[in-house]
Amino acid sequence: MHLTVKLSTTLRDHVPGYIPEKGLQVTIPEGCTVGGLARHLNLPQQDIKIVMVNGRQHKADDLLRDGDRIAFFPAVGGG
Amino acid sequence: MFRFLRVNMATKTCVLEEIPQEYAGLGGRALTSTIVAREVPPTCTPIGPHNKLVFAPGLLGATNSPNANRLSVGCKSPLTEGIKESNAGGQPGGHLARLGILAVIIENMAEEGQWWQLEVSKDHARLVPSDVAGLNNFDAVANLVEKYGKDCSYITIGRAGEFKLTAASIACTDRELRPMRHAGRGGVGAVMGSKGLKAIIVNPEGGKNQPLNDEKAFREASKRFAKALAEHPITSKGLADYGTAVLINILHEAGGLPTANFTVGQFDQHESVSGELLNQITKERGGTVAHGCMSGCMIRCSGILPDKKGKFQSKWPEYETLWAFGPHSGIGDLDAISQYDYLCDDIGVDTIDVGVAMGVAMAGGGIPYGDAKAVLDAMHGISEGTPLGRIIGCGTATTGRVFGVRRVPAVKGQSLPAYDPRAVKGQGVTYATSPMGADHTAGYAVTANILSSGGTVDPLKKEGQIELSRNLQVATASVDSVGLCLFTAFAILDVPDALPAVVDMLNAKFGWQLTGDDVVTLGQRILSTEIDFNRRAGITLAADVLPDFFTDEKLPPHNTTFDITHDELKTVFNWVEEKN
């Protein structure tokens, strides 16, 4: 299945050549979870605080579907 | 010896008085709101002689507590017509506390056309004719520094305050003597202008840290609080590296980034106004990442962004500033927004109410949508006092009326900040119910709704939002009274020892025996005082609502509406007995 992945702040450092405007286009077998995708991308699990799939928060063991847009965030805050 | 400094602008008298018993143990917002509630007639004209302008450092000002030197400014607001507290970083809060002055109370008005400046030092306070009237903040401060020196701090208004525009702010100088930390909301600058007060010069020479009842206990508690701030990833590193602008991308992903005057929740140029880009170009241009705006700041969120040639351009624009002039107004140019930010600081206006007014003027055809040059011209118009400039400088609600816009994002006359209440519903509860008018800082539900800080509450559902907003509004009233930067709340929400450390610092300073529950009681008492003032001013429960387009129109991409009913909103302040 084909996914679009967006990374924020320090997580971008783990994917050389990451282009913010485009994000990543990832092709991965069906049945992949949020956590599996993070491992596939070599993102450090301990740095991931928030994952949004199509604008809703998800957990590591949630299954992904073809065409999903996934955004990974470390702890961020402001106001 | 702690004192109030009472300044009468009509008689030009400055009197130091002992703290009346009824104000003992109050600081920051608790003190400004209590003084305003007791001393200001609620139905008075905000820019008339009966209003008072109160400046108060927090309870932990001028101690070794981290991040505790903020300055609260209180009055009846010319924007909301209700009670107002707006607080700022920078140096004056800590300096006033070092002088033992717990509140400066400005009363009455100077004669029309006269401008005065107030000198405050260890041994005297006096009003002298101002020689910086007509200047905006940066030039005014540069002139004052030449006269009074680099060791003072400065509180000033720009031309917007002189014009008494209802979005006018009050500027405080940072550690480098730049007037960039503002009490922005509610038009407090117009009240200062109405009194004929152009500037306050605070000379901290001879002042000292405030005395502590138990020095050793204070030192230990302060270390624990510092440890909590140093442990938490947001207060230790995240805010320092990316500023509050880091929120642009996450609110875009969540579909809660209000775009094109609250018609959609995502902005296709979000990366071009993001915290990540701000960090990158600041480093490339030799600017400053991780800059603290006040002494004792550990969080350091206020970087400095140079222009393309490396020359000072502005501080890092806050997330709300980037959003208001950016996604909300259709402008995806970080440098242009940085220039507007500088102009807001210089002219002395709230970046939120004026930025949102720009987008509302665009919606009404007053300015072409997304036209960066037209926005720049309108900013200069505020300083020049042109008709369009005065309209925009009076903020969102006024601009919406003048341009015949139905979709005006404001509550009690104050514009909504950068979180759409249909996609961040807990924030919508705070906007609707805060006695301050729409204000994200009054109860920052984005924490649990979006950032998973202090728990998690689904931002798109109504369940749990009333309680979330209630608890945060109560806690925030206390934080604003202690003088702490609101960003310490991330550590207070997530690190179990952070709140006990703050309580222990208060106990060690004052010899109190407070518990965590007392902090809740204090917050409730402050809110009760503020709500009571508003009721006496004629602002009833009927005003605790969002504009109806939020309930009528679905917000893409989640296509949700704000479905928390007015009857449900009425339960937020469930300890307050309504008399009407």
Image (cartoon, rainbow, N blue to C red):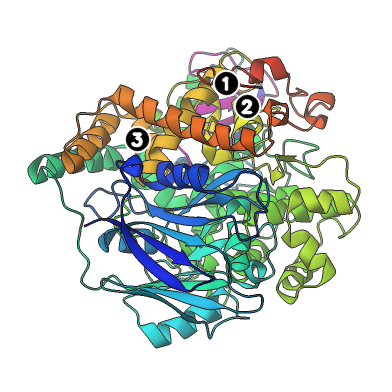
Question: Identity of the amino acid at label 3?
Answer: Ala
Can the viewer see residue B255 in this picture?
Answer: yes
Residue B572 shows which numbered tag? 1
For disc 1, the chain is B
Q: Is residue B356 left or right of residue B51?
A: right
Which amino acid does the dot numbered 2 rest on? Val
Q: Nearer the viewer, mark 1 or mark 2?
A: 1
> Chain for mark 3?
B
**Disc 2 marks which residue?**
B429
| Picture residue at 62% right of the left edge, 75% below the top | B111
Residue bounds of the magenta highlight: A50-79
Residue visible at 26% across and 71% down in the picture = B122
Mark 2 or mark 3, earlier in chain: 2
Callout 1: 10 Å neighbours few (<14), some, many (20+)? many
The circle drawn on residue B210 is none
Q: Position of residue B25 (x, y in %)?
A: 30, 41
Q: Are marks 1 and 2 in contact (CB under 8 Å)?
A: yes
State the CA–CA distance, disc 1 to disc 3.
Answer: 25 Å
Classify B378 as above or below B273.
below
Co-location on one chain, circles 1 and 2: yes
